[in-house]
Image (cartoon, grey):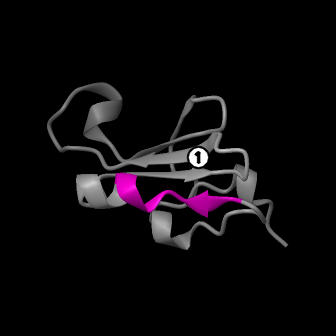
Amino acid sequence: MKNSMIDFPSNPDDWVPPKGVKEETKTRERTGGKHRQWKDESGKIVRRWDKGTPGKPGWRGSDHWHDENGNHVKPNR
């Protein structure tokens, strides 16, 4: 079984969150899916997805994740 906390797929729909972690739908709905985030049972954000905008500098220009510590992470599959 894959460890979901080190899995950063290029498509956020392909990420299977660990037990007790659920996607916060209001972020997805407000941004049209450009930003998505998942929270644990205590309400802490444990994963965030940001869709890049082509031509923007740095991380804003590429699709990427934020891990449970807020660090930027490139998709690894």
Percent across and percent down for residue 67 are 61, 39
Rendered view: 56 above or below 37: above
Would you say residue 23 sits in the magenta stretch? Answer: yes
Q: Identify residue for label 1.
A: 47
Q: Is residue 55 left or right of residue 70?
A: left
Q: Secondary structure at mark 1?
A: strand
Q: Residue 73 or 28: which is nearer the viewer?
A: 28
Q: Residue 77 or 38: which is nearer the viewer?
A: 38
Percent across and percent down for residue 59 are 35, 31
Figure quadrant of the N terminus: bottom right
x 24%, y 60%: residue: 32
x 59%, y 66%: residue: 15
Percent across and percent down for residue 8 are 59, 54
Percent across and percent down for residue 11 are 45, 65
Residues in magenta, as a range = 21-27
x 18%, y 32%: residue: 56
Look at label 1 and name its amino acid.
Answer: Arg
Spot the residue most to the right. 1
